[in-house]
Image (tube, coloured by chain):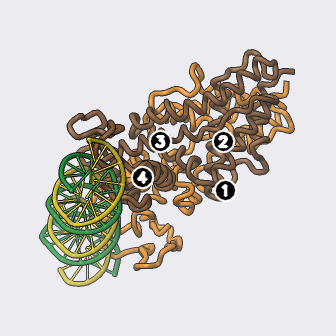
Chain colours: A orange, B brown, C green, D yellow
DNA sequence: GTTTAACGAAACGGCACCGTACCGTATCTG
DNA sequence: CAGATACGGTACGGTGCCGTTTCGTTAAAC
């Protein structure tokens, strides 16, 4: 929220808790400019840590240590821990995959889900989702921000593909696009999460089987 | 607040250590017997707290305070925080609903999902699941124990109903029971969790619509 | 009544963390 | 050049929790 990007765009940032002096967007400064590498390092490190220990488990000190920056460098950019967490979550949108423009909608869904499936084991993104999800009730403000800016982007990705399938006649005309989107996202999230513990919630099923199982009721033929 | 040991070594569970008296039912002692009300109060309080703040957020002191017992009373029963958390999770199985024995499998599914749906707002059970889920990778031991003893019980509930539907011919004979079970559980978990933040992942859809959407592809006809 | 152990309460040392403040240094603008 | 600001470190006070231990008390068994 109160984060400022060194890039320049002097967007008016507002803090929700004006308890202390806000970190306003720095006017084209006369002094030493902020290190953009520090910006990136802080955000990616925060994201990694977010995936490992979640929003409450994340510590600013640990972020600073891992990112190789001083704590002051972080507090110079963010109003506090919550602000940092939110900024890190927002940065997830820069890694959003694109929907394949060709082929059947089914194949496109399988492709996107497969990408998620694969990225789950090595990237931070996979673990961030369930971690943040757990705070839907505890911290609705944070979760809401996350949902609206990150989840909604993903939903839109699936929604677009599914709509294409409806228009092309591949899916039934009366298919509930929103519900279908929810089914794909939720089951993927769940299966991947269970897999992370070494169990298997759907033995013998990969992304394709998962998608096909969901789609069976929505196909036209 | 979650503690992250800098060295990376997670807290060692003393559950298997015989060094300190492990928690066990005291064998007919001669002194003052343990207060059974304390047993129940500790577990239910721990469960409530687990739903509110999750496994790492839970503090033994808070449990003691809310349960109206001394910390010593807790440490007399449990080897430590982890042991307490595990016991609390296990106690979830005492609240497992039963599968309706009559009616269609579809109606039984809707009934069970509706029960989950309703109980979700009562906080305890509903919020515990996503909280624990977030630790599938961080604490696989805890999650595994949770999955095997709690999730598996729920799966079995759904599995039983779905199998009945397959046998009765209500569902297709080639339906993947495990996958179908996963779909029902995952989507319910997801929708309820999103709802907890005030959003709606499936506008206009309740338990019945959710179940029907999943089942459309698995019905015989 | 004596023994035994659980009880609630409180205190302890220790650790991790937050957020701030201050270094000496580095890198910009004017 | 001088002034301004960011940099990586480091230190600090304050807070919260952990896990343990000590109290004096209480409730059962013997």
Where disc 2 sits, the SS reads helix
- Measured in 3D between alpha carbons, the distance from the residue under mark 1 to the one under mark 4, in whole angstroms, is 38 Å
Counting residues from the N terminus, which is met first, the one under dot 2 or under dot 4?
4
- B161 left or right of B44? right
| Residue A92 picture location, percent across and down | 51, 50
| Residue A220 picture location, percent across and down | 84, 28
Front residue of this view, candidates B130 and B70: B70
Question: In which quadrant is the N terminus of chain B drawn?
Answer: bottom left
Question: In which quadrant is the C terminus of chain B drawn?
Answer: top right
* Chain letter of the residue carrying label 2: B
Q: Residue beneath label 3, please? A: B89
Q: Residue at x 64, y 30 (%)?
A: B157
Residue B126's place in the image compared with A205, above or below, is below
Q: Nearer the viewer, mark 1 or mark 2?
A: 2
- Measured in 3D between alpha carbons, the distance from the residue under mark 1 to the one under mark 2, in whole angstroms, is 14 Å
Counting residues from the N terminus, which is met first, the one under dot 2 or under dot 3?
3
Q: Residue at x 52, y 45 (%)?
A: A130
* Chain letter of the residue carrying label 4: B
Q: Residue beneath label 2, please? A: B188
- Measured in 3D between alpha carbons, the distance from the residue under mark 2 to the one under mark 3, in whole angstroms, is 20 Å
Q: Residue beneath label 4, please? A: B38
Instruction: Please rate how many residues cluster around mark 4, counting C-alpha atoms within 10 Å: few if below 14, some from 14 to 19, many from 20.
Output: some
Q: Residue beneath label 1, please? A: B199
Residue D15's place in the image compared with A166, above or below, is below
């Amino acid at each position: 929220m109160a984060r400022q990007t060194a890039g320049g765009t002097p967007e008016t940032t507002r803090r929700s808790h004006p308890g202390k002096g806000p970190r306003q967007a720095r006017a084209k400064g006369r002094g030493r400019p902020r290190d953009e590498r520090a910006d990136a390092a802080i955000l990616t490190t925060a994201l990694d840590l977010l995936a490992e220990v979640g929003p409450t488990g994340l510590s600013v000190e640990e972020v600073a240590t891992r990112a190789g920056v001083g704590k002051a460098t972080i507090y110079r950019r963010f109003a506090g821990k919550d602000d940092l967490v939110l900024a890190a979550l927002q940065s997830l949108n820069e890694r959003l995959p694109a929907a394949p423009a060709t082929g059947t909608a089914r194949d496109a869904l399988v492709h996107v889900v497969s990408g998620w499936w694969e990225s789950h084991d090595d990237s931070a993104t996979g673990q961030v989702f369930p971690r943040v999800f757990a705070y839907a009730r505890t911290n609705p403000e944070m979760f809401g921000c996350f949902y609206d800016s990150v989840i909604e982007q993903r939903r839109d990705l699936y929604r677009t593909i599914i709509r294409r399938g409806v228009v092309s006649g591949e899916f039934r005309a009366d298919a509930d696009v929103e519900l279908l989107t929810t089914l794909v996202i939720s089951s993927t999230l769940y299966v991947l999460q269970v897999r992370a513990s070494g169990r298997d919630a759907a033995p013998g099923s990969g992304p394709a089987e998962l998608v096909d199982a969901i789609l069976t009721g929505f196909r036209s033929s």
